[in-house]
Image: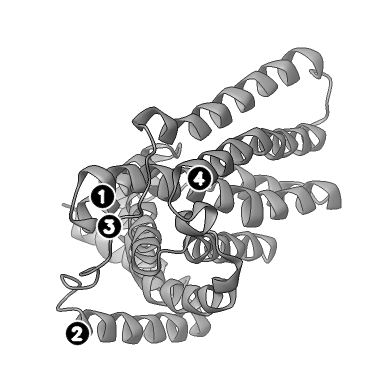
Amino acid sequence: MNLSRLNEALEEMGGQLSAIDLIVCAAGILVLVVWLLKTSLGTKSLVGSPPRRNNMPVLYAFIPLFIWVGTVSVLFFIKERALAGLSDWQGALADNLILCIGVVPTVAAGLVIAGTRFARRLSGFGLDPRTTARDLGAAFLNLLAIMPVVLAMIILTTLVGKIIVGPGFEMPQHDELKQIIAYSQWQVRAIIVVTAVVIVPFTEELIFRGMLQTLLRSFIVRPWPAVILASLVFVVFHANPQHWPALFMLSLCLGYAYEKSGSLFRSIFIHSLFNALSVFAALGQ
């Protein structure tokens, strides 16, 4: 291990944190510490959280994911063949439109399955509109508590990368963040905001928390192993391995929020707020 590189990386990362970042992190650490103390370091945090009652066959839990991947893959194939002459910004616009279009049959299938296979239908699945106000407030607190951990994982990943690869290592940005920085056209930026802040959080939470985590809990009595396994699948679904440690911590928070509240809206709001912070931070560059 090269200690000089470690020191350089620490100094560089420290210089990138603003006073507001440090204040938010301090508040988040306080909330997290209080939660850890109240839950015996998290071991009692999900005691008494019952599985969501359902009669969903195993294959049904994967149908929305298959539809999303299949529909988007076919649409991207058609785009590459039929719309090869698009400019770069038009291509970025088309890519995000494809993601939005692919969501339509995906969400429709998920809602049909939830409405027919869960006790209390969509409410039993975690989509009860009456809980949205409470879930939004709790989402802010949950995200505040997990942000220092996510940031720590980003810093740790960067440090390890700089030590192993060298000073030139940088955490890669998500494709949509690259696009929103690269293209100033309002159409591109608007569709990226909608995709990242609304479409992707709702769809991914429906698939990975609502369907997959619920399925795992049907076979695993204890909630945390189901949350961990669903989180592992969630991070592998994302393209950049450098993002996996931070995404895993975020996913644990999402899975915990769903199990603790029984509301899918809570994890959707956390996911949406996290993506919104990333998008607007990129716009501010």
| Disc 4 secondary structure class | helix
From the image, state whether disc 2 or disc 1 is nearer to you.
1
From the image, state whether disc 2 or disc 4 is nearer to you.
4
Horizontally, residue 69 falls left or right of residue 167, namely right
Q: Quick one: label 2 or label 1, which is nearer the N terminus? A: 2
Q: Residue at x 63, y 25 (%)?
A: 71
Kind of residue sitting beneath label 1: Ala
Viewer-proximal residue among 25 and 250: 250
Quadrant of the image containing the C terminus: bottom right
Q: Residue 194, relative to residue 253: is it above or below?
A: above
Q: Which residue is mark 3?
A: 5
Q: Quick one: label 2 or label 4, which is nearer the N terminus? A: 2
Marks 2 and 4, how far apart in space? 36 Å
Marks 2 and 1, how far apart in space? 23 Å
From the image, state whether disc 2 or disc 3 is nearer to you.
2
Q: Which residue is mark 4?
A: 114
Give neighbour class at mark 2: few <14, some 14-19, many 20+ (Cα, 10 Å).
Answer: few
Q: Is residue 94 visible?
A: yes
Is the C-beta separation of discs 2 and 1 under 8 Å?
no
Which circle marks residue 65 in the picture? none
Viewer-proximal residue among 277 and 12: 277
Q: Residue at x 70, y 40 (%)?
A: 100
Is the C-beta separation of discs 2 and 3 under 8 Å?
no
Q: Quick one: label 4 or label 3, which is nearer the N terminus? A: 3
Give neighbour class at mark 4: few <14, some 14-19, many 20+ (Cα, 10 Å).
Answer: many
Q: Is residue 235 visible?
A: no
| Disc 2 secondary structure class | helix
Rendered location of residue 176, percent (x, y): 63, 46
